[in-house]
Image (cartoon, coloured by chain):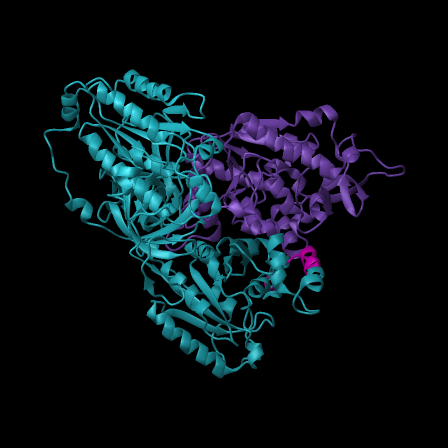
Chain colours: A purple, B cyan
Amino acid sequence: MSQTDRVDAPARRARTEKGNPGMGRLTHLQRLEAESIQIFREAVAESERPVMLYSVGKDSSVLLHLAMKAFYPSRPPFPLLHVDTTWKFRAMYEFRDKIVADLGVDLLVHQNPECVERGINPFDHGSATHTDMWKTEGLKQALDKHGFDLAFGGARRDEEKSRAKERVFSIRSAQHRWDPKAQRPELWRLYNASKAPGQSVRVFPLSNWTELDVWQYIYREQIPIVPLYFAAQRPVVERDGALIMVDDDRMPLAPGEVPEQRSVRFRTLGCYPLTGAVESNAATLPEIIQEMLLTTSSERQGRVIDHDSSGSMEKKKQEGYF
Amino acid sequence: MAHATNDLVAADIEGYLRAHENKSMLRFITCGSVDDGKSTLIGRLLYDSKLVFSDHLAALENDSKKVGTQGDGLDFALLVDGLAAEREQGITIDVAYRFFSTERRKFIVADTPGHEQYTRNMVTGASTADLAVILIDARRGVLTQTRRHSYLVSLLGIRNVVLAVNKLDLVDYSQDVFDAIEADYREFAAQIGLTDIVAIPMSALRGDNITELSPNIPWYTGPTLVGHLETVEIADDLHAGPFRLPVQWVNRPNLDFRGFSGQIVGGSVRPGDRVRVLPSGQESTVERIVTADGDLDEAIAGQSITLTLTDEIDVSRGDIIATAGDPPGIADQFECHLVWMSEEPMLPGRPYLLKIGSRTASVTIAQPKYKVNVNTLERTAARTLELNEIGVANINLDRQIPFDPYTANRDTGGFILVDRFTRATVAAGLLHFALRRADNVHWQAVEVDKTARARQKGQRPALLWFTGLSGAGKSTIANLVEKRLHDQGFHTYLLDGDNVRHGLNKDLGFTDADRVENIRRVAEVAKLMVDAGTIVLASFISPFRAERQMARELLGAGEFIEIFVDTPLSVAESRDRKGLYAKARRGDLVNFTGIDSPYEAPENAEIVLDASGSVSAETAAETVVDYLRGTGILTPPEAS
């Protein structure tokens, strides 16, 4: 059994128990799910060419699961877009292709052609240039190329302080910039998705979810996630205090540097040379949640990109980083 | 409590997960002035519920030393003050949403600033809140801001209020101070209909009565703040109310399935229930409640579902499916509260888009009946509403919509207004009731109609709308066009500033609001003349797209012909026959289009005339007449 198919939640409960809250109010996960579905439907009804950004991570898995529910029995009326850097973990590509085949959804993959040509990579060009060119520029290229006027993303308000004020429907200029002063007030369940010429909309159905909500929902709904989230013996080297997995032979090793097998897992997934692993023995969903509740470093800490200054995510957002 | 959580997590994670799957959720808003300690309170809630991670904590310690206001202590406010610009100013300037949870509940906190100019943000935060925490600085008691926040809480329909009397440590934990503030507040709150109030003495900075009862306040026997938040029962009218489902999306995966997807915003529904679709009024019966987790026997307010009906009736996005026995009303004219949220003031008569539920309609607003001073609750006369002003006005929609009064249902009675050109959300509104006027003013049925009148004149009626800068040559060209048409035997009339401003509109000036009203009256007069079968020429600067669009929408298809007399400002200014540009440049004339008031050029004018000087006015007039001939305006209509 592959880890993708891992079944470590209790046997799926009877439909009536799970789907029908019976008398009384809804649980927090039911309310969050219903809100996300409402957002999906509203966005699709008010746009001409929607797309869902799919990064293969756990939040994308939840987002895709909610999209499948929102339009059931129809399929989601939009394609998935993976803005690829060619430097993701191999396990992420395998997982992506399997999910797309299993669910029968359309997937578009975009790789910034300039990066392909120049061979942009984090070792020779640095993490900032690598991320900016593959991801930020790549995303803009893909949106412009296909003429998408609305893009779903999996960002959450609890991830970072500057995101606490992000709208569910976030307006971007023709240059894909985020202007904190031009964001629209959002009242009740009413979202203003209309655009002036050239503007586009980013929509975040998971805005009100926390990391714990996401894990509990994955557990409750048995949503498949990339096996890298579960602890296993993996070859890693230690660099600047981070454990980097040697995922393929493109990774240059320093003289005398020898990968060692350690039991590690990843709390967040990105380009493998830029994603730090944590030492862990958590091999099931409950163990992951347990570990998360008992440790005290936040999720984004594993991302090398956030470390420079506390205002950095905000700057990236203004420049169009998702 | 935190230790107990950790023990359970460590010992029995699956038991913990089962328990937490059944937590409920509470959304609340915190309201307070800049110095009431609101950010400190929220930072404290996050900190005490162990949601501050070690890396954030390190940043907090670092920031506290650098920019904190608490000496060597932790400045919890820094945990929640987000954007860099705000941090420099030391105040929060927008709505931020924070999350924490306890053993019993998940909480979503809308954190809104207390400044007077940010009514917009507080109304936004309050619109989704079940409960409001109103902070008071114990040293200062009930302030103007406290009244303002309470009024907004009451207006938005929040009934549960926590009065958090903060900074009690700074008044020696005095019971007398606390009791006096509580009594003072209750007296005021009762006047605005807030009665469900729990007052709690606390110090957010010291942690008194936040999660644990404080030994410093032994005389207080009520709940802690968190204790109250995790047990308070929210009056749940929505579940008890009549069934309402705004249809968001028609779900048609194949020819055999036709479902209506939406989120239930009132009551509950079961297969077999009789329902009515609004505004059409058609009735049917619920066949299935479809979800990806299987069909349901019952669905309740808050759930997102897909319904199928037993009959094939017409249902589209924007319709409401409601219980047949207690459906919402239908109307196109309402009295409502408006909260203005845009830098651009409200313009009575200008068409805006109104979004309510999943429906969008075009709407115009009458001059407000009054505006409310949110500090004193006094009503004063108003011609318009500016940013952060609240008023009551009548609105007029272009079609009938289903609705409930806001006090009965937030989702079928609350709406937003969207500017048709900038696409910004400019206002929030709360419907009070429908106006009966619409039903009582019936159109006089006439036998001699527009077509008959036009046929008699051997032409089709039309409105030729000349727009452009002052000095562009609009009136010159319009006069030439009218002369040619008249010479050929057509029936025309020219409306321009000279014959309108001196009579019908002599009460209007040149502010934006007056310009809008000027054009509205001209458009209505022109409409009557078109109805009389006339070819009307209107020559007005008419700088705003929205008003020209309004004039267009008053008329029938093909009747409105927008003619853009296109002149660069420099050319128009160099002509300056009336000396107006010179006056405007000197500052003797204000609100002058092109100088200190904008001109919004047409994007899709039927005719664009180059009036830069390279084409003569005679040639331009001929272009217009050729267009009229080409589109059949100069040919009489067939008998209907």
Residue at image point 27% right, 32% down? B314
Residue at 45 percent across and 44 percent down: it is B584
Q: Which picture quadrant has residue A107? A: top right
Q: In front: B478, or B243?
A: B478
Give the vertical position of B435 relative to A73 (above or below): below
Q: Residue furthest left?
A: B447
Q: In this view, does B65 lie above or below A301?
A: below
Quarter location, residue B123 = bottom left
Front one among A179 and B280: A179
Whether residue B298 is visible, yes or no, is no
| Residue A279, position as x, y percentages in the image | 74, 48
Where residue B338 sits: x, y (%)?
35, 53
Point out the stretch of residues depicted in magenta.
B47-61
Residue furthest right in the image: A256
The x and y percentages for residue B300 are 36, 49
Which image quarter is the C terminus of chain B in?
top left
x and y, in percent, of residue A21 in the image = 40, 50
Any magenta on residue B50?
yes
Say which of B574 and B83 sits in front.
B574
Nearest the camera: B611 or A88? B611
Would you say B261 lies left or right of B80 here?
left
Report which quarter residue B216 is drawn in.
bottom right
In percent of the image, x 46 and y 71: which residue is there?
Answer: B143
Would you say the magenta stretch is mainly helix, strand or loop?
helix
Is residue A53 left or right of B276 when viewed as pictured? Answer: right
